Amino acid sequence: MCLVVFAWRPQSRQPLILLANRDEVHARPTVALAQWQDQPSIYAGRDLEAGGSWLGVAERGRFATLTNIRDVSLPLGAQSRGALVSNYLASQQSPQAYLQEVASQMNQYSGFNLLVGDQQSIWYLSSIEPRPIRLTEGVYALCNGSLDEPWPKLVRLRSLFHEHLDADDEVMLELMQDEQRAEDDQLPDTGVGLAMERMLSSIFIRGEVYGTRATSVLRYFDDGSSTLVERSYNANGDCVGQTQVQLPADLTALS
């Protein structure tokens, strides 16, 4: 997952609204959002190469998502970052306890930003500053730097999101298809070269080898229910499917 924006408003009718784009090599095998047969409490897309996920929900009101940190100077880890999402969704630990455990094992993973939460709280952990942080009410965004680091596409998306907080899922999905690229003087320098920085600077990335493969909309409601919508794309950037799951307040999943 490479771009996430969300509003955490515990006292509102929709305590959480989260949008995310997963950017990945098109050849990497993936299964779209579904209930996992081997772990039935989890509802998420799945990376078939390493077995983890980029965003998902689970019974008991749990959710998790992550972004990679793009910095060629950071060491590579032996463990898949996608397991950070699926392990939390399958666990019984509180968000805080889970992130404290992950923080003690940070050197096993390549650079990441990780969000985990439930109906009561959202917590954040980053390889850049490996200390679990409980997020207060507000609007936040994650790209491939630290939380709210003002990369151009993060700033643009957060502004669009603010303007459309009351919009339906269809509008939210369309926001995430914005292909406007940043000017060269606004680009970060993460060590991948100017041509790649340009390609990666749009909210929606279209590329033959690498690009946006899925867009997700997650909503939590004040009655304890939630919905997760995922739209999938092919290498041309065309929509090739859309899936939705609902977790009602009694935490029995419906498709």
Image: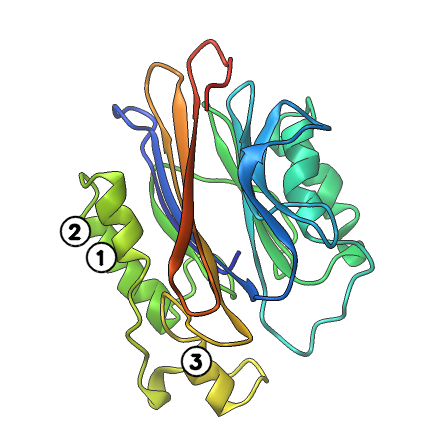
Camera-nearest label, 2 or 3: 3
Residue 24: image location, x then y, percent: 56, 64
Residue 95: image location, x then y, percent: 60, 31
Q: Is residue 203 left or right of residue 113?
A: left
Residue 224: image location, x then y, percent: 40, 16
Labels 1 & 2 near each other (Cβ < 8 A) = yes
- Residue type, label 1: Leu
Alpha carbon distance from label 1 to label 2: 5 Å
Q: Residue at x 43, y 80 (%)?
A: 199
- Residue pointed to by mark 1: 160
Labels 1 & 3 near each other (Cβ < 8 A) = no
Which residue is farthest top? 250
Is residue 176 among what the camera can see?
Answer: yes
Q: Is residue 221 left or right of residue 61?
A: left
Alpha carbon distance from label 1 to label 3: 20 Å
- State the mark number for residue 199: 3
Labels 2 & 3 near each other (Cβ < 8 A) = no
Is residue 230 among what the camera can see?
Answer: no
How did the renderer colour the structure? rainbow
- Residue type, label 3: Met
Work out whether 118 lies above or below 126.
above
- Residue type, label 2: Glu
Comes first in the chain, label 2 or label 3: 2
- State the mark number for residue 163: 2
Alpha carbon distance from label 2 to label 3: 25 Å
